[in-house]
């Protein structure tokens, strides 16, 4: 996944990747997105639902992302509007703070050499 692909993602796509990559969540590639963080997978014998936090639209959920990076993360308002989040010196801009946090975190994990800890 490239920086450009991450910056172009819709919020529900960001949420899925944050869930899978940063929080070692279940792979949802075989699930269909149904809205508001819900995914469904229909098999011959069952219907399986999974819910993913709205990391990119809910500040409380996005803060969990920030906390994974500790002191290597900060956010600031942009003078022209929106927010700039930085995770491990990797910055991303978005109209909302949660989206900026998530985008910066996903971009940061593209290059593991920049990451502290167990990422």
Image: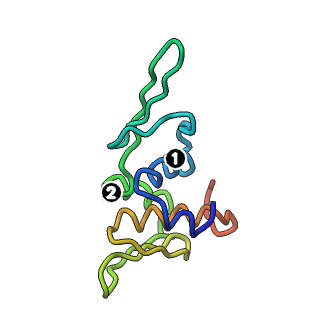
Q: Disc 1 and disc 2: Cα gap in Å? A: 17 Å
Name the residue furthest top: 45
Report the front residue among 88 and 10. 10
Residue 37 appears at what percent x and percent y? 37, 42
Q: Residue furthest right?
A: 113
- Say which residue appears at 37% left-offset and 45% top-offset: 53
SS for dot 2: loop
Image colouring: rainbow
Find residue 23 and name its label.
1
Screen quadrant of the N terminus: bottom right
Quadrant where the C terminus is found in the figure: bottom right
The residue at the point 31 percent across, 58 percent down is 59
Mark 1 or 2: in front is 2
Please say if the residues under marks 1 and 2 sit with CB atoms less than 8 Å apart: no
User: Mark 2 sits on what residue?
Assistant: 57
Coordinates of residue 31 in the picture (x, y in percent): 51, 34
Mark 2 neighbour density, 10 Å: few (under 14) some (14–19) many (20 or more): some
Q: How many marks?
A: 2
- Circle number at residue 1: none
Estimate how packed mark 1 is, as few (under 14), some (14 to 19) or many (20 or more) residues with alpha carbons within 10 Å: few
Task: Decide: is 79 above or below 48.
Answer: below
- Counting from the top left corner in percent of width and height, residue 58 is at 30, 55
Q: In the drawing, does residue 25 fall left or right of residue 80? A: right
Q: Residue at x 39, y 63 (%)?
A: 99
x 49%, y 46%: residue = 19
Asked which quadrant contains residue 111, the reply is bottom right
User: N-terminal of the two: label 1 or label 2?
Assistant: 1
**Quick one: SS at disc 1?**
loop
Give the quadrant of residue 57: bottom left
């Amino acid at each position: 996944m490239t920086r450009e692909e991450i910056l172009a993602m819709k919020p529900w796509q960001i949420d899925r990747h944050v869930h899978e990559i940063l929080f070692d969540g279940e792979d949802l590639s075989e699930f269909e997105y149904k809205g508001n963080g819900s995914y469904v997978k229909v098999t011959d014998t069952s219907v399986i639902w999974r819910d993913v936090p709205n990391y990119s639209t809910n500040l409380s959920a996005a803060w969990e992302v920030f906390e994974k990076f500790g002191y290597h993360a900060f956010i600031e308002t942009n003078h022209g509007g929106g927010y700039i989040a930085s995770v491990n010196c990797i910055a991303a801009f978005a109209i909302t703070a949660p989206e900026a946090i998530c985008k910066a975190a996903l971009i940061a994990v593209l290059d593991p050499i920049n990451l502290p800890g167990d990422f």
